[in-house]
Image: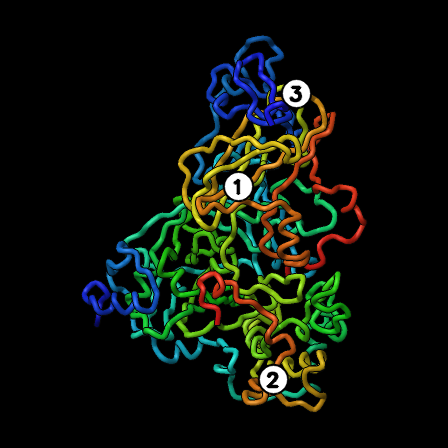
Amino acid sequence: MMKWRQSAAALLLLTLTGIDVPAGDVAAGPGLGRPAPADLIAAWDTDVMPDGTGLPPGRGTVQAGEVLYRAHCISCHGERGLGDSGDQLAGAKMGLRDEWPEKTIGNFWPYATTLFDFIRRAKPMQTPGSLSNDEVYALTAYLLNLNDIVGPDAVMDATTLAKVVMPNRDGFVDAWAAEKGTTP
Amino acid sequence: MSDRLQSNADTGIPDAAGNGLMDRRLLLKSGIVFGATAWLPAASANPKPEGTPAAGFARPKWMREPGREFSAYGLPARFEQEVARFAAPNRVMRNNGTSWTPLHLLEGTITPGGLHFERHHNGVPDIDPGAHMLLIHGLVDRALTFNVADLLRYPLRSTTCFIECGGNSNAGWNRVPSQSQAGYFHGLVSNSEWTGIPLGVLLQEAGVKRAAKWVIAEGADAFAMHVSIPLEKLMDDGLLALYQNGERLRPENGYPLRLVLPGWEGVVNVKWLRRLELTDQPAMARNETARYTDLQADGSARQFSFVMEAKSLITSPSSGMVLKGGPGLYQVTGLAWSGRGRIKKVEVSADAGRTWAEAALQEPILPRAFTRFRIPWRWSGAAAVLKSRAIDETGYVQPERNALIAQRGRHGFYHYNGIVNWSVDEQGNLGHVYDEVAAERSGTPAIDADWD
């Protein structure tokens, strides 16, 4: 096992990759970490990345999603995602440049994959983590359809969802990259 | 302008700025007495003091009987019950929302643990530390888990810093100036001494692969809240905090483990931390795309705008208070902070920004931490507008509200750090006004987004 303090090469590597390691931090701790079992990582790592990495097997339709939406979501997000005590999800009448902009999935969210990730990890609010992957795909399909991103017959799965291009995909300015002078 | 300055007959020292702002050095002069600033609603809510010396100079009640016994964990005096957080939950999901630190009722710089602001997305989890662990995985040489008992055996380090929600002060974007008390408008910021393990120690133990650029941090709450953070911030000064103000973290502040990233917006200081995944790209999580991004006038949105820029706020006297003593001397005091380092200077104006005087800064002035400022002010009894502006060690000057809007538009929602104006009327009542009061009173709705 390589320790940073034992390896000038490692420190050089960090320097080359632009990570500034304050001298005081180089001192290693007592090394009490335990090897993480692969099944633990698999169970805990539910991240879905913007390129679709992490999307699980399964599939869901717009129709199935509407049924689930009515059961789990409508009480806060309202009829057809128009918003209530919870966010407005669809049906923006005002654009992002208008005097009273409405930010919805359809006109603001840059990646459709975020929708799957977020529903799976956080929804529904009363019983988070209770939806199956098929159900999450179905809700994703329904919400994308509400926002006119996919058609009424769309089926969402790991392949089709990763291919969805959101209208506001290029609507974000990376302030951190700008600050670091590394604008992509 | 020197013709606005008047000599103070009592001190012989010229005023430092117009409308009665005095030289900060007079704070050190013996015999200076300030008028009382009262927060009216609170004063009327106070229990009637017992033991008023009605019977002349007899021993008061609490000197004629033994005091109460010891307590396992002390509480504030019962006369201070109004010093409390103000909760603003979602109307249906009551565990989603914010609670605000009563900055206007506090002094010094350290926020008591029980008054630290809260932003929870789905409640405060009741985490058994014996059943909690931190996983570090992804682009590392070896994925590791750490249990809490083992983490407590690492060498610890303390840092005092503020944590400010990216959405703090966002009522400042409103068309109509909020009349909330200062803390219930600007109090999604608090300042604590955090003690924990430098993240670099744990990341180095796992072995950072060269391709790693980002860290996805995830909490163990019902929201499984996750965000992406540049790896270099964690390596520079990121702390895995276990203690806050000397005691283990409060549940509301991430017990048993939270990230503390000094100077960066609150959402990346992930509470209840359970997972750090090193990656070559950000996750584009909901809370770094749909939320915590700053919509600009041209329709684009600033993303990954982590650093909280310099800001200041007069906490007393402030909106809702009254200058109870009538015309005379008052102590103007407040807080300044910057996510980029130390506060270099705070300037105060009593004439709506025409002239400014430098306030005294309370030592120690720590980087990315609350700095307390004070300046004496002689109120003439006429209407006045009090302002403060912070200047940090990078030279950045806190902007006027109009300048901020010109730069960012009206719908940024996050990262509001404009100069705050407190108006004083002839009766000594304080309120909140914008520079162009009339033009702004359009009757349009308050802020057009909530905290879901």
Q: Position of residue B239 (x, y in %)?
A: 38, 56
In terms of image quadrants, where is residue B21? top right
| Residue at image mark 3 | B325
In terms of image quadrants, where is residue A161? bottom right
Which disc is residue B390 wearing?
Answer: 1
Q: Is residue A2 placed above or below B160 in the rendered structure?
A: below
- Taking depth in this image into account, of B447 and A152 the one nearest to the observer is B447
Which disc is residue A164 wearing?
Answer: 2
Q: For the view shown, which residue lies furthest in the left direction?
A: A6
Identify the residue at image location x=68%, y=82%. A149
Q: Is residue B363 placed above or below B130 in the rendered structure?
A: above
* SS assignment at label 3: loop
* SS assignment at label 2: loop
- Taking depth in this image into account, of A98 and B414 the one nearest to the observer is A98
Give the quadrant of the C terminus of chain B: bottom right
Residue B415 left/right relative to B30: right
Is the C-beta separation of discs 3 and 1 under 8 Å? no
Q: Is residue B206 placed above or below A140 in the rendered structure?
A: above
Mark 3 vs 1, N-terminal side? 3
Which-is-in-front pick, marks 3 and 2?
2
Which disc is residue B409 wearing?
Answer: none
Residue B70 seen in this snapshot:
yes
Identify the residue at image location x=48%, y=23%. B25
Chain name for mark 2: A
The amino acid pointed to by label 3 is: Gly
Calculate the distance from the C-alpha at mark 1 to the C-alpha at mark 2: 46 Å
